[in-house]
Image (tube, rainbow, N blue to C red):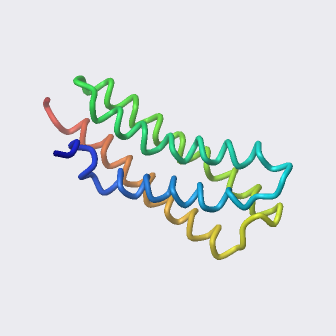
Amino acid sequence: MSFAFEKLVVYQKAVTFADACCSLTKDFPRGYFFLADQLNRAGLSIAANIAEGNGRFTKPDRKNFFGIARGSVQECVPLLEVAARQGLIEGERHDKLKADLEEIARMISGLINGLDKREV
């Protein structure tokens, strides 16, 4: 048996993004722990808040957690930018991860808009 949120494509993409962050930051040199930690936390927060929001019973609660997930997407953008500027991530990988974030953000917005359209 699986949880309902595990079937959501946006959740699956968010987990894949969090996994990519873990892979990326494990090779950050000493002295960049702050950046690795923050990127990993923000990346994981996206999937975690989608999951938690899906488990809530009321629309306002769901919407709140989906909004937090969308905020975590936004948080990842400057973290990836700093990593790129510091030479910790190559341009092509940065662009791919940023494109993934853009897609996840659109999908989370769709979740939120879908809640607004539903009666229950």
For the point 13% across and 31% down, the residue is 119
How many marks the image carries: the answer is: 0
Question: Which image quadrant for residue 37?
Answer: top right
For the point 72% across and 67% down, the residue is 89
Q: Give x and y (percent) for residue 47.
A: 42, 45
Q: Quadrant of the C terminus?
A: top left
Between 18 and 46, the one nearer to me in the picture: 18
Q: Quadrant of the N terminus?
A: top left
Q: Give x and y (percent) for residue 103.
A: 44, 60
117 up-or-down from 18: above or below: above
In this rendering, position of residue 111 left or right of residue 102: left
For the point 55% across and 61% down, the residue is 20
Q: Give x and y (percent) for residue 100.
A: 49, 63
Between 81 and 24, the one nearer to me in the picture: 24
Furthest residue toward bottom: 92
Q: Give x and y (percent) for residue 79.
A: 69, 51
